[in-house]
Image (cartoon, helix red, strand yellow):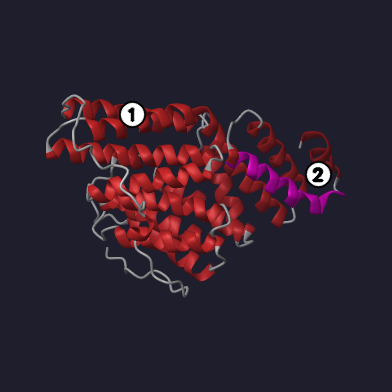
Amino acid sequence: MQIAATVGESGHTPATIADFLPETDPLRPLSVRLGRRIGATDVKDLAGRVHALRLADDVLAGRDLIGPALRELRSAVKLYREASYTAEVGRSMLLQIGELAQISGWIASDAGRHDEADRIYRLGISAAAQAEDPALIGNLAGSLAYQYSNTGREADGVLLARAAWDSVSREAPAAVQALTLDRLAWAHTKAHENQDAMRNLGLASEALADETNRIPSPNYLYWVNQGELQVMEARVYTELHRPLRAVPQLKDVLKRYDSAHVRETALYLSWLAVALADANEPEESAQTAARVISLSSDVASDRTAERVRVVVNRLEQYRDVPEVRYVLDNVA
């Protein structure tokens, strides 16, 4: 399947990944390298620690993981700058630094440390660009665009999400294409560019369902599947105030979702609570909101805390409903 390079016309000035790279190169190796010589085994060990951090993020929140993530990232950059190695090992190190920057940036953002996440993501984009890996560039740029879209920088989110898509090869693995288009759809949603949002949601689903694309996906996208796209679609429908589309999708996902992923469960339930309120179902919305608040109380995540605030504000419209009033006065 060939997807057109232009996936929306919103009047923004075109941007490229180069516009978002650090002004200086934080990865420049030292002219005199004082560290040890490293090889493929060292890179493999680092890759294992990076993946372990990703798996930890599935069950732990940002403020629990930010310390270990930053230590690993600083150590990896220091090793790359100070050690000696072959060109092949150097490129492999850059790829692992890029992957480590992506998960570390995600963790920092979840911890509410958005400025730090911005710097980390840009470091990762630089590493991926030097390693000439379009899929990793797109993942990092899309992650940063997602943060922009959720923190009041909607126009920047659209610019960077589109640059991320432009950086991804149209021959990329299906999961790479789908995730990049999904994040572009979300950026358009937060910028109130509804037609572009819906168009890109459709393209994301088409990309993931493309049976002719047999290119293996990177290991770091193990979590990208039809269920995750379904969640994004439901969130977009919620933002667009289309609860008749959002509610069934969210309920379907949640009944199959791993309850060990507490943060994501709380986040998905928060969207369901809002969609139910939009559907004029305040009693069920209040019941769902109570679960969101309960789950979030034990999660060290800035994202869940923000979603609790959104849900509580949405329920205020129905304060006269006894079930809602109880949640607002005794649970929130």
Question: Which of the 4 image quarters holds residue 91?
Answer: top left
Residue 93 lies, with reference to residue 310, above or below; the image says: above
Residue at x 44% of width, y 74% of height: 9
Query: Can you give x and y, in whole percent of width and height, for residue 33 in the image?
Result: 19, 31
Query: Can you give x and y, in whole percent of width and height, for residue 79 in the image?
Result: 26, 30
Q: Say which amino acid is labelled 2.
A: Val
Where is mark 1, residue-wise? 75
The label on residue 324 is: 2
Q: Give the range drawn in magenta.
A: 303-320
Position of 291 compared to 148: left or right?
A: right
Q: Nearer the viewer, mark 1 or mark 2?
A: 1
Q: Distance between the residues labelled 1 and 2?
A: 49 Å
Residue at x 43% of width, y 45% of height: 119
Where disc 1 sits, the SS reads helix
Residue at x 36% of width, y 58% of height: 164
Residue nearest the observer in this picture, 270 or 19: 19
Q: Say which amino acid is labelled 1.
A: Ser
CB under 8 Å between discs 1 and 2: no
Residue at x 62% of width, y 61% of height: 242
Instruction: Give the main secondary structure, helix, strand or loop, of the magenta stretch.
Output: helix
In reply to whether residue 207 is colored magenta, the answer given is no
Residue 55 showing in the rendered view: no
Q: Local crowd at mark 2 within 10 Å, few (<14), some, or many (≥20)?
A: many
Query: Can you give x and y, in whole percent of width and height, for residue 172 in the image?
Result: 26, 54
Residue nearest the observer in this picture, 218 or 46: 46
Residue reaching furthest to the front: 32
Question: Which of the 4 image quarters holds residue 270?
Answer: top right
Q: Which of marks 1 and 2 is nearer the N terminus?
A: 1
Quarter holding the C terminus is: top right
Query: Can you give x and y, in whole percent of width and height, for residue 219 in the image?
Result: 30, 38
Quarter holding the N terminus is: bottom left
